[in-house]
Image: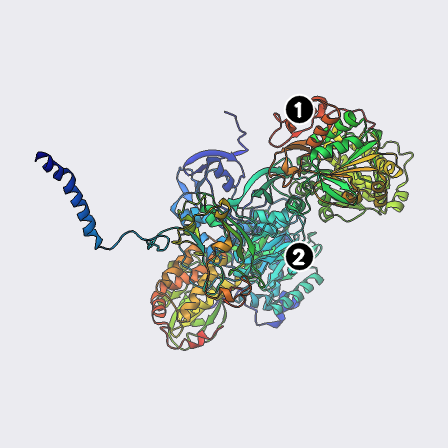
Amino acid sequence: MKGQAQMYRDVVKPLLAGFGITAKRLGRKKVTIQYPEELREQYPRTRWRHFLTRYDSGLERCIGCSLCAGACPARCIYVEAAENTDQERYSPGERYAVRYEINMLRCIFCGYCQDACPTGAIVLRKDFELANYERSQFLFTKEMLLEEYPGQNLEPHKGKMQGTIALKN
Amino acid sequence: MAEYKLLLEHSDDTAYRTLDGYRKKGGYKALEKAVKMERQAIIDEVKASGLRGRGGAGFPTWIKWNGLPKEKVGKKHYVVCNADEGEPGTFKDKQLMEETPFLLVEGMTIAGFATQGDAGFIYIRGEFIDAAKALRAAIDEAYAAGLLGKNILGSGRDFDLYIHMGAGSYECGEESALMSSLMGERGMPRLKFPHAPLPTISGLWDSPTLINNVETYTCVPFIVNKGGEWYQTLGAATKNSRGTKIFSVSGHVNKPGNYEIEFGTTLNELLEMSGGMKGGKLKACVPGGSSVPIIDAEMCGRAVLGYEEMSDVKSMVGSGGCMFLNEHTCIVSFIWRTAMFYAQESCGKCTPCREGTKWMLQIMERIVAGNGQPGDKELLLEVCSQIDGRSFCGLGDAAAWPVAAAIRVFPEEFDYFIANGKSMVKSSKDLMLVP
Amino acid sequence: MATVAATDTVNIVINDVDLQVPKGELVVEAVKRLGHEIPIFCYHPRMKPVGMCRMCLVEVGFKQPDGSVRKMPKPQAGCTLPVSEGMVIYTDTEMVHRDRKGVLEFLLINHPLDCPVCDRGGECPLQNNTIFYGPSTSRYIDIKRHAPKAFPLSEYVTLDLERCIQCGRCVRFTEEISGDAQLAFRFRGAAMQPSTFKLTDFDSKFSGNVIEICPVGALTSSKYRFRARPWDLETSEGLCLECGNGCNVWLDHRAAKLVRVNGRTNEAINEEWTCDKGKFGHDYYNSSKRLTQPLRREGDRFVPVSWGEAYAEIAAHLGAKSAALVGSTVSNEGLFCLQKLFKDGFGSENIDHRWTRTLPAAGERVAKRHESSIASLEHKKTVLVFGADLANSQPIVHLRVRKGWFLNETRVVVAHSQTTDADSFANLLLSCKPGSLDDLAMGLERAVAEAQKTDVQGFASFKDTEKTTSVKESALREVAAMLLEGNASIVCTASIYNENKPVETLAALAKIAAATGAEFNVYAEGGNDEGAMALGVMTGRNTHEILQDCAMGDLNALWLVGADPLTLHPSRRLAEDALEAVPFLVYQGLLECEAMGYASIVLPMEAPGEHDGTYTNIEGRVQRMQQAVKNPGDGKPAWRVFSELLVRIKPGRPSFSAKEIMDEIAATHPAFAEATYDKLEKEGTPLKPVIENFYM
């Protein structure tokens, strides 16, 4: 008898309790999501992949000032600037970034570049799927970083956007 | 006190503009006397007269004359006359040069004798063509009569006199800018004492240079002729202003014009001489040219014309351009027009004046246009204080004083204009139309 | 404590600290003695103060006999006010801070604040002063002044009028330092702007300096435009080898590419200035025509080879009947190794680096080529510039001579057959007919001899001199009198060897110098030509003879070290014939060039800033330049090539570093005894004078 009681206390009861929890939770909403088929909602201020934003006209916000590179504690941003001309205009004003590269392997996603940006061109958004198979793929170029905008596909040449915005001078 | 005509005594006499007529009225007696005097004796005479600079600052004239080296050290000495009369409201030098040119020529020749000057330059404002013509004729006559050039009156001393026409810059009335302009440089002020030697040591072409106003030089023949002691008695009622002063009265008066008075005359007496107010009661007065602080009617009532006396009403004698404004004048618009003048005439050399005068004008413009912002009055005062005393030369100060004074004396007009977008004075339309 | 003569110093008080400073020193300089700083824009220590920006306002008072201080009613500009006895200066009062804030507010109301796109952003005095002394907000709500952005003032200088704060530094530079007076202020008041007269091109040989002294981004470099930001840059101390002056520069590079050259202060040479050749002439560093690997001719094309193969080929073809022609930017080490390679390795002595029309033989050369140091020229009473266009060939010497004229009343005499920039300030101009400089020198010699009442037999009469040179007797006598007053210097350059009878001309000038006690200088022209002379590189056949021998087939091989005879040699025909005829040609250089087309072997060379080395400037000052940037390809410094090749021919220990070679040079050349890397001084070490009993 003593053995049976002990058996019940040590084995059956916990077993039933355990299954009980399972049975109880069966009816509740599931927390686990089916990644990669499903993606979890991110917090509003999550900082992941960088984007280079544009004005509504399609002109790039980035003016190639290199302040992000100066602010970057990981020294992972490389900017090379060039001069806009009336024929070939990428951004309002005199200067634009002809090369803009971020080494995502080095980036620590601190967001200082976003803080430093005087035009709000570089922003860190919620895209977090940054894994890749090759190290060279982690070098994000300007083409990869530039966000899309509605009229993008209609533009024959990305840079040529005349008369889309009232420019100074 | 009534008018006291000393310099302008024969101004109506056209014969006075020729050498003969001038000599008949006692002209060139002073030079004849000065030729026989010791150099220092002439300077002492000027010292005794208590003559002070008539250009605006009121600096004792004899100190300048005495400041030139007593013995020449290889450099020429120059005598310069500042006839670039650009102060709005002032037109005394124009009349003096046009109607009594020989007084200036004689005065400068005496100054040349007293300071061993080799050459004199009269820097005339570019617009004063008649004045330049009158002076040209006078100088030619003086040369022909041996009163200029080599061996003047047998004294064995030489003195040449040149006329230089300015090109229309107000800034070139500032003595160091005038000298820059005279030397062919851009008309910008140069470093002054204590940053650089005084012009009496190193002026034109780094040589000792005496520079005085037209009116100052024209007083000299009388001082030499009748003695400094006599000149000293004129204006004895004042603290430290001696002699006569020509005031150019303009504005809302019945008889605008030049009035020569003894120092110590009151502003009210000057107003009476010029026929009293026209079109309304006296509201305000700018007693010494546009750059001196404005005073209201109450202050006008107790203002005595004298260098020290005017500071009792927080204003100045300046160059004597006395503008009377009647009760229908909008002070804000008046100051706007003044600010426009200074913004245009700033030479651009120093930051406070270059940027500050423009900013003041922009603030005044938006007030007058009815877009004044709350706080604009305080901002104007602040900008004035950032210009006053910080600029390179006096132009910055001169631009700041009238604005600051107008806000001090008539704050309610500014407040009303800023708050309501229109002038407190009903019929200010006429003034508003001024460009 | 050192006792200072009472007349030379005055007692002043700065922020309640008593001190003595030299009389007449400007307040802005005096406060630095206590470690204080007065912010400035328009003030520049090398130019006359003007007091335009009003940034340096300080409160000043004077000690009264009773011990109290009477303050001046207005604040005073510290950059123009000389100190005087009993002066009391306050740099830290509330009023001073308020004034600085006021001035900065004024400066900023019309400033576009486009710092992110401005090339000056990050190294801008206006930014710095605003951060330290300026207001944090603006009360200006009206429309700012607008002007065209990026107006090209010249090929090199871009003007942005919106950013200009009208400090006048650029205008004063062209008036006071460079002397071409190209810039001036136009208009007045708020519309005032610096520009050239009538908007012509900013045509100056020193225009690049205004970019550096501009306290804002109004004047920027067209070449450096948008190339980098200051925080992207790394900088190294460098030397400019465009001419022999040896200017000190900063080499600013980004990602291993040279992007900008700025002046570096060296009081003995360039003070802080650079010429436009030095500042903008560095395109070759990043040129697409840079040679990157050794090449061997195969038929009518070049194929890349390894250094080893190239060495083997050269070693097989060069021997006693070979020669080398050297360019002007090879370091002392390179020249020394080349000499060693040819002497010890090939058994040939045929090396030359000169490209002038006349190449004086050993006995005819002037022994003392630089009696006056560059810095001493500004203190001379008289400088005779003879047959030299200093502004073009010796820009920094030109600036020094002009500085002497501008500040110290040096009398400048220019004797030349062409117009030069120095004519504008020359007290006396001896402009002679072309090709008559020799007669002019003789005429001058006669004038000196007559003035000293020595024998004048054998000289041409002044009449004849005037006939041949068109220079009048009176002018010659005047110059002679000036030289005889003492403290004079005669300045010639190696370009005199392109004139008629240079040896006789120089001999006459040397005699004049000896007779009058003047210092005599024949400054070298190329970057390291003085080094080549001091090392005695030209030993065997000279340049003309080498090329003639090549053309005649007397030489089997020619090695061109950073030199293209087709552009350098006065006779292009001879150079062509020589390159055509010589059986084996080695071209070692930075860039592809015409002469390369004749080469059998092409070797890439490192540019001066890409390796360690020392260079000797015209006044015999040995200076070291360390590696600043990396070679873009497989290039090697010249000395390494020579030393590695020597090991192949004559087995031994190669030199491992430039330092080692310099030690060897110091041991073998007495003049270089003090010029080892351990002993080189910050400003460079002058060569030790070596007494050589040449004919003069």
Residue lying farthest right?
C458
Count neighbours of disc 1 (C-alpha within 10 A) and say few if under 14, some if 14 to 19, many if 20 or more: some
Image location of residue C368, percent across then percent down? 76, 30
> Given the image, on which type of amino acid does mark 2 rest?
Asp
Left of B195 or right of it: where is C321? Answer: right
Image location of residue C211, percent across then percent down? 59, 49
Image quadrant assignment for residue B108: bottom right
> Closer to the observer: label 1 or label 2?
1
Count neighbours of disc 2 (C-alpha within 10 A) and say few if under 14, some if 14 to 19, many if 20 or more: some
The residue marked by circle 2 belongs to what chain?
C
- Toward the viewer: C539 or A96? A96
**In which quadrant of the rendered image does the C terminus of chain C lie?**
top right
Image location of residue A52, percent across then percent down? 46, 56
Residue C324 seen in this snapshot: yes
Left of B86 or right of it: where is B384? Answer: left
Counting labels gives 2
Secondary structure at badge 2 equals: loop
- The numbered disc on residue C663 is 1
Left of C44 or right of it: where is C458? Answer: right
- The numbered disc on residue C201 is 2
- Toward the viewer: B63 or C533? C533
Instruction: Using the numbered discs, state the Cα–Cα distance from disc 1 to disc 2 in whole angstroms.
Output: 49 Å
Image quadrant assignment for residue C48: top right
**Label 1 close to label 2 by CB (< 8 Å):** no
Residue B37 seen in this snapshot: no
- Toward the viewer: C278 or A69? A69
The residue marked by circle 1 belongs to what chain?
C
> Given the image, on which type of amino acid does mark 1 rest?
Asp
Lower position in the chain sequence, tag 1 or tag 2? 2
